[in-house]
Image (spheres, rainbow, N blue to C red):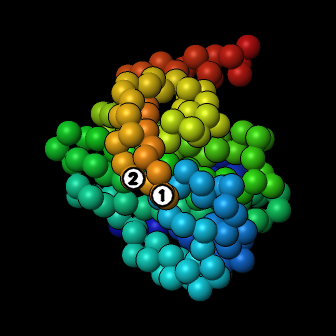
Amino acid sequence: MSAALELETARLRLRPLTSADEDDVFVYQSDPEIVRYIPWPVRTRDQVRVALETYAARTRLAETGDSVLLAIVDKASGTVIGQMNLGLESRADRHGEFGYVVSRAFAGRGFATEASACVLDYAFDTLALHRVTALIDTRNHASAAVARKLGMRREAEFVESEWFKGEWSSVWIYAILDREWRAWRAARDSMVGA
């Protein structure tokens, strides 16, 4: 991937995060409830600024270890309501991993599912990945619900596998294969057309 990745859905625009997004990003990255299961702490405005500078360097998906971070922009308001990440875990095995976070003010409206479906389309159709996974803290039932809505299956649970924010936490691995994604998408599209 050479040009900046930009994707679009009916309600959302996904594009690289920029320093101009600082105010919107600060809203959710400074919210203890939102970052509870995310692998970064509650951030100050300065920490958000540094994070945005770091994100700017993540622009390619060509080799193992590459990743991109995208703003989830609500088209109606122009607000950055969250972010998506997509990483190339193994080029040889065509394996990717993705994650999402949505601001509390926009939660519960299907934005995470909509943005994730768009990213999965890109992962399977454009990058030709074979398998995409999501690592989800077992206490994060809302995130697990998003994965299930996308047709992903829970493959594993790593019990107390990491020391996370002062306590042992367990992680679920959700996964979907390219053929499973195509079947899920075809079923979704046939219901929309019915």
- Say what amino acid the circle numbered 2 marks: Trp
Kindly identify which numbered label has been placed on residue 55: none
Give the camera-side residue of 169 and 131: 169
Q: Is residue 1 visible?
A: no
Q: Is residue 168 visible?
A: yes
Farthest residue, direction top = 194
Residue labelled with disc 1: 166
Contact between labelled residues 2 and 1, with CB atoms less than 8 Å apart: yes
In the picture, which quadrant includes the N terminus?
Answer: bottom left
Quarter of the view holding residue 96: top left
Rendered position, 29 above or below 33: below
Left or right position of 21 against 54 = right
Residue at position x 45%, y 44% in the image? 169
In the picture, which quadrant includes the C terminus?
Answer: top right
Mark pair 1, 2: CA separation: 7 Å
Residue labelled with disc 2: 163
Other-residue count near label 2 (Cα within 10 Å), few / some / many at <14 / 14–19 / ≥20: few
Residue at position x 27%, y 58% in the image? 65
**Secondary element type, mark 2:** strand
